Amino acid sequence: MHKIGIIGGGQLGKMMILDAKRLDYYFVILDPSKNCPAHSIADEHIIAGFDDIEGILELASKVDVVTYEFEHINVEALRILEKKGHKVYPSSDTLYHIQNKYDQKLWLKQHNILVPDFIKIDSLEDIKKAGETFSYPLILKTCTGGYDGKGNAVIKDEADIMRAYETLGAGKLPLMVEEFVPFEKEVSILVCRSANGEVKVFPVAENVHRNSILDETTVPAVISEDTNKEAMQVAKNAIAAFDCYGMLCIELFVTKEGHILVNELAPRPHNSGHYTIEGCYTSQYENHIRAILGQPLGDCSLIRPVAMKNIIGNVDKDANVKGLEQAYENPYVKIHLYGKDKVSVGRKMGHITATAPTLEEALKAVREAHDKISF
């Protein structure tokens, strides 16, 4: 029996376990929350912080391979595991080059992968110089941390610099500025590499964000064949550049000319890949587990058009889901709830997927189902 350790017990970890339990694999998770989503189905749960080296060592001692469901963890802890002979995928080196967004962009640029122009920020004066170089608006980012729009601030003009600077901690965290990209679309692409060297690329997904949080994903993306080919090649180049094993998600901007620029990377299964559970022959979660075990990867082709819509909290209270029966009236709909006991504004509580004969039907199905669900 394969034993797999996951640092993090959120919904991504839960979905990894759900897909792999068909093969009766044994899972140990590490998460500080007793009631995290993956707790209900993990075989063991080590309650410890994500920077707790002793806890992470205990996790590794119980399993054949260690992976993680988010990137804001202690790279040094992973290096210690590797030095002790434990298998860690993606590796500490992969995470090191991705975890800091400035270093990530440098690494991409060094490997001839196109990104928006960017500079590192050490002072308010540097932000003013960036405005002169790139013109406004600008995107101010923290180099570390940040997700679902947290860690980003738009600077509209020079008078807006101080507000954005203070919003992101007034220099307490390392900062960078990126040029603003007037993109036509936001898309993402998932690529997987097995420890045996095999690489598979999933279809390009088209994403819509609301309040900087992913709202809807539709596949196939409505883009030109040339743009699709360009995205596929970027995916292969990126997973090679970062020497990544397992899943890698590349978020991309599509320009007016149909070219692409890399926005950000995540070395793990991704929210924009939830659609793969119903929409592809093999999901991102199953292929991630296959990859870190060195197994052959499954076919990740699209079965038929698919849409995914996140269920995001709009109140602060105990989670009590209502409207599921009504949401299921559409036969195309599949609902995933993560098992979080508290709902809060902006918190991802679940998602809805629909596969259908057409993209329009799939999108209509998830939107109608979403409107019937409340807390």
Image (tube, helix red, strand yellow):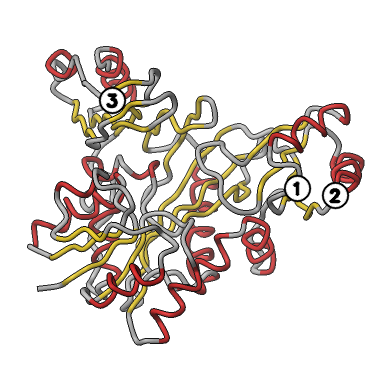
Lower position in the chain sequence, tag 2 or tag 3: 2
Q: Amino acid at mark 1?
A: Gly
Residue at (30% x, 59% y) in the render: 30
Distance from disc 1 to disc 3, alpha carbons, whole Å, reads 44 Å
Which residue is labeled 3 in the image? 362
**Is 325 drawn above or below residue 226 in the view shown?**
above
From the viewer's perspective, tell me whether residue 191 is left or right of residue 125: left
Could you tell me residue 154's position as x and y percent? Answer: 71, 32
Q: Nearer the viewer, mark 1 or mark 3?
A: 1
Count of all numbered marks drawn on residues in the image: 3
Could you tell me residue 50's position as x and y percent? Answer: 41, 59
Which residue is labeled 1 in the image? 171
Residue at (34% x, 55% y) in the render: 8
Which residue is labeled 2 in the image? 123
Residue at (21% x, 40% y) in the render: 278
From the viewer's perspective, tell me whether residue 106 is left or right of residue 137: left
Q: Secondary structure at mark 2?
A: loop
**Is 119 drawn above or below residue 246 in the view shown?**
above
Q: Nearer the viewer, mark 2 or mark 3?
A: 2
Lower position in the chain sequence, tag 1 or tag 3: 1
